[in-house]
Image (cartoon, coloured by chain):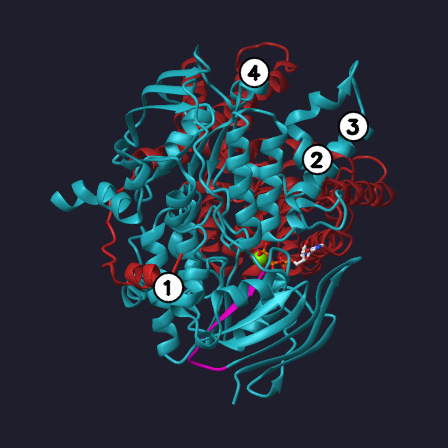
């Protein structure tokens, strides 16, 4: 290496070769493969369901199924945000239980009291979630551990407030779930609202930062992201959606339950994974999660119309979960071998 | 007045002193090179300047004002941007999202204004004549060199007064590296201060106005670039005189063929490559980047799917995955390109990284012999002079060049006698570079067979016995003896491109 050689190097024209291969359709399809698989599964389940049961392809059925799936959808929306961040939130189980028992013991016929407590539940959800995020950052603990602990604590508090299923919510609150606008019930409108929310959220600075932190935390930090703040917002939102799920759940049950929340913990993760959200963070969309939630809900319907034991429902859910994980790992491998 | 003045800067990590007494001063409008051995503290210094790490003692003045950034945002606010050695990019975001991350143009709904972002991206890439990049491509689909270029764009997007390039050329092929050198001059001409870190003396020589030399965490000298010779600089860097960088090339190749490759193809990137690598030979692989070199190495190691026939020591084999490639003394070992992605487990210790793929060698009756392991690890650490506090230090906290040494050691420990070295000296300091070349020649003399790719062309010219030049996934020419020169390699690499 001499100075002359370098000088000569510097004089050579830097004619960069320009490669512009156009839109990479195959790459895009592979990226979305898990989502497409989820859509396919849903279509298949709907087809089977429709062939066994009449009246499946009606507005009524859509209204009904969406109402049945909405609690899970709300819980899974929060979970999707956390998964995107590369974490997991088990505490939503506790939050949902706590939300229902507060609602069942505090809601009254007086709308303003009820509204106050509904807002309080939402605020509590965000606050407890934010606390999760703070603990994870400050103590540098695994999200799994921290949220497992808060789940247990919230569950205990719910038990103290209302030891067994019971209490009640006003009938006008229950009626909310069947309120209609243009033939669609409020859960369907909520579903659309969730999609709009996601479309907006994912393009905001907060949304991108959460995704980026899940994709590569070190890089995000080097780019100026405050990891503590990201965790606070991520888990806060998850808690908020869990509280929302609780408020919706009481429209379905009409009462509170200190144990009901645990039924949503793993399904919320499963719905997201079926919909193509990565457990390793950074990848996934709410549309997939919502489809996953529909898949899990309709499996229940299917088991019912097949007149088999309801114990088949978890078996079928598990098989579907495995299939979708398999599909996404195959797609991931295919995508990777293309890059190299 | 100086734009940056640093006095007595110190930083320690537990018992490890990364900086003991760093002094530095630089003016706006100059290219200021920062030189030093692996682990001398260069990256630590720029991490402090860019707010990623906080210093323990000493002072930094910017424009004569005290400067102590609490985080990278604070540094950006003062006009400092760093192009990090280990990159700061987000794999799941697109190129343009990465470039503008946290500084995206917004719409009224607070969402990213995609049209505006695209426009700004193209304008930026245009202004500094960047090599072609697809703004909408996801980052994890890019090669290491392309990522490095995105990282540079990301730094420039902030329109910084001070831009720091930490070994930014080391991941770039010749042409892009050349472009970066020009860009560096352009940035200085715009009145910015460029702090330039590189282990390639020729580059430093070509662009630096002034230089500062670190050794063991302290500044040992600062010079006007034209007032000091290469030899003096190297001597100050490593604390002794370096006689020669490249070892004498005594041919040691025998007639025995170690690795025979026939018609190996993989997708569109590699088509029908044939060659024979002999025992005792160092066979260079050159050519412009992106013409199949990477794919060739990956295919031989079994990391990508490929068709064709491969013979090891005369025996036909099929290599479907890295495990099969790594079978003992007759096997193949690879030093990969992307050390953080493929070569190292960053959250594991130096010891674990070294011995991971050779655990069997310390296992007796199913039990791990810690002592035997410790001996081998110590031997390797001493031999390669890996600068780590203890063998238990996490690989992710080593300096860049020392990480590269760990990968090299890991490969040597496999005892495989066919070595695939893909840019083994990337980010390695001059002193160690010379040692690695010497080691390569020594291994060849012992009957190892070495396939060697380097992004630094002079290395191929001075170290390899023969050089295969690749073009469009084929071997365009094989140069031997006196025909090996940068000129010839370039000619073979570009002939067809010119005709087209
Ligand atoms: N997080 C950390 N924990 C412990 N030690 C560290 C950490 N970061 C850096 N070091 C140590 O500080 C020293 C200086 O490292 P630094 O990365 O600054 O070197 P460098 O001059 O950039 O070397 P290179 O040329 O190899 O990139 C090294 O010995 C390294 O092991
Ligand atoms: Mg460094």
Instruction: Give the left or right position of residue B494, taking residue B91 as reference.
Output: left
Q: Quadrant of the C terminus of chain B?
A: top left
Mark 3 vs mark 2: same chain?
yes
Instruction: Rate crowding at label 4 as few (under 14), some (14 to 19) or many (20 or more) other CA atoms within 10 Å.
Output: some
Is label 3 in a helix, a strand or a loop?
Answer: helix
Residue A111 at x, y percent in the picture = 66, 57
Say whether mark 4 is within 8 Å of ligand 1: no
- Of badges 2 and 1, nearer the viewer stands 1
**Residue B312 horizontal side relative to residue B285, left or right:** right
Q: Residues within 10 Å of mark 2 (few under 14, many from 20)?
A: many
Answer whether labels 1 and 4 touch (C-beta < 8 Å).
no
The local secondary structure at tag 1 comes to helix
Q: Quadrant of residue B346?
A: top right
Q: Which chain is red?
A: A
Q: Nearer the viewer, residue A276 or A7?
A: A7
Q: CA distance from mark 3 to mark 1?
A: 48 Å
Q: Which mark is residue A16?
A: none
Determine whether A244 is above or below A320 in the image.
Answer: below
Q: Residue at x 60, y 55 (%)?
A: B38
Chain holding disc 4: A
- Image x and y of residue B467, in percent: 34, 36
The percent coordinates of residue B61 (x first, y second) are 61, 83
Where does label 4 land, which residue? A303
């Amino acid at each position: 290496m001499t100075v002359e050689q370098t000088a000569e190097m510097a004089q050579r024209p830097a004619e960069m070769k320009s490669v512009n291969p156009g839109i990479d359709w195959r790459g895009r399809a592979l990226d979305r493969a898990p989502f497409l698989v989820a859509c396919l599964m849903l279509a298949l389940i709907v087809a089977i369901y429709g062939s066994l049961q009449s009246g499946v392809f009606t507005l009524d059925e859509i209204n009904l199924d969406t109402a049945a799936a909405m609690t899970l959808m709300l819980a899974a929306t929060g979970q999707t945000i956390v998964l995107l961040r590369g974490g997991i939130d088990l505490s939503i189980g506790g939050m949902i239980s706590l939300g229902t028992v507060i609602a069942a013991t505090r809601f009254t016929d007086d709308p303003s009291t009820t509204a106050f407590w509904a807002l309080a539940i939402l605020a509590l959800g965000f606050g407890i979630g934010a606390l999760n995020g703070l603990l994870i950052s400050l103590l540098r603990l695994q999200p799994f551990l921290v949220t497992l602990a808060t789940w247990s604590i919230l569950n205990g508090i719910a038990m103290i407030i209302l030891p067994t299923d019971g209490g009640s919510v006003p009938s006008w609150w229950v009626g909310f779930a069947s309120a209609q606008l243009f033939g669609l019930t409020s859960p369907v409108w909520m579903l659309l609202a969730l999609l709009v929310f996601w479309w907006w959220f994912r393009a905001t600075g907060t949304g991108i930062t959460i995704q980026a932190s899940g994709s590569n935390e070190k890089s995000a930090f080097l780019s100026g992201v405050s990891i503590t703040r990201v965790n606070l917002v991520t888990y806060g939102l998850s808690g908020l959606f869990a509280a929302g799920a609780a408020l919706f759940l009481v429209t379905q049950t009409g009462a509170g339950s200190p144990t009901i929340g645990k039924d949503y913990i793993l399904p919320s993760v499963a719905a997201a994974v079926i919909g193509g959200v990565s457990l390793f963070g950074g990848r996934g969309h709410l549309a997939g999660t919502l489809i996953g939630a529909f898949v899990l809900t309709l499996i229940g319907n299917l088991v019912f119309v097949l007149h088999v034991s309801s114990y088949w429902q978890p078996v079928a859910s598990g098989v579907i979960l495995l299939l979708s994980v398999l599909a996404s790992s195959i797609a991931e491998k295919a995508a990777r071998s293309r890059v190299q | 007045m100086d734009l940056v003045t640093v006095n007595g800067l110190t930083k320690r990590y537990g018992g490890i002193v990364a900086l003991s007494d760093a002094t530095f001063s630089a003016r706006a409008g100059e290219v200021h090179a920062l030189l030093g051995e692996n682990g001398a503290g260069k990256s630590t210094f720029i991490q402090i300047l860019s707010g990623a790490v906080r210093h323990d003692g000493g002072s930094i003045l910017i424009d004569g004002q005290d400067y102590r950034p609490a985080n990278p945002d604070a540094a950006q606010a003062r006009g400092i941007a760093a192009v990090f050695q280990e990159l700061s990019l987000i794999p799941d975001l697109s190129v343009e999202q990465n470039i503008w991350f946290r500084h995206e143009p917004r719409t009224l709904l607070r969402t990213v204004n995609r049209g505006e972002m695209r426009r700004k991206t193209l304008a930026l890439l245009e202004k500094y004549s960047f090599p072609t990049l697809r703004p909408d491509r996801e980052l994890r689909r890019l090669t290491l060199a392309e990522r490095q270029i995105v990282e540079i764009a990301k730094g420039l997007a902030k329109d910084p007064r001070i831009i720091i390039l930490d070994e930014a050329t080391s991941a770039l092929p010749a042409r892009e590296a050349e472009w970066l050198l020009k860009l560096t001059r352009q940035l200085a001409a715009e009145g910015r201060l460029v702090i330039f870190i590189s282990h390639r003396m020729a580059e430093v020589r070509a662009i630096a106005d002034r230089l500062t030399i670190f050794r063991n965490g302290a500044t040992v000298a600062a010079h006007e670039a034209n007032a000091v010779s290469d030899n003096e600089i190297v001597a100050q860097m490593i604390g002794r005189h370096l006689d020669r960088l490249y070892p004498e090339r005594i041919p040691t190749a025998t007639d025995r063929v170690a690795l025979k490759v026939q018609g190996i193809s993989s997708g569109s990137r590699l088509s029908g490559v044939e060659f024979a690598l002999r025992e005792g030979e160092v066979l260079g692989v050159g050519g412009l980047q992106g013409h199949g070199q990477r794919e060739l190495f990956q295919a031989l190691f079994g990391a990508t799917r490929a068709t064709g026939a491969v013979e090891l020591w005369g025996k036909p084999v099929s290599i479907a995955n890295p495990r099969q490639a790594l079978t003992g003394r007759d096997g193949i070992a690879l030093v990969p390109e992307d050390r953080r992605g493929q070569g190292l487990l960053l959250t594991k210790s130096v010891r674990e990284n070294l011995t991971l793929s050779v655990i069997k060698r310390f296992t007796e009756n199913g039990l791990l012999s810690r002592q035997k392991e410790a001996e081998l690890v110590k031997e390797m650490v001493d031999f390669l002079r890996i600068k780590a506090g203890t063998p238990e230090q996490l690989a992710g906290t080593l300096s860049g060049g020392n990480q590269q040494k760990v990968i090299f050691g890991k490969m040597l420990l496999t005892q495989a006698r066919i070595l695939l070295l893909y840019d083994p000296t990337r980010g390695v300091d001059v002193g160690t570079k010379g040692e690695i070349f010497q080691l390569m020649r020594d291994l060849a003399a012992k009957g190892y067979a070495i396939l060697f790719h380097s992004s630094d062309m002079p290395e191929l010219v001075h170290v390899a016995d023969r050089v295969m030049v690749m073009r469009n996934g084929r071997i365009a020419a094989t140069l031997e003896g006196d025909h090996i020169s940068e000129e010839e390699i370039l000619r073979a690499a570009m002939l067809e491109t010119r005709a087209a």
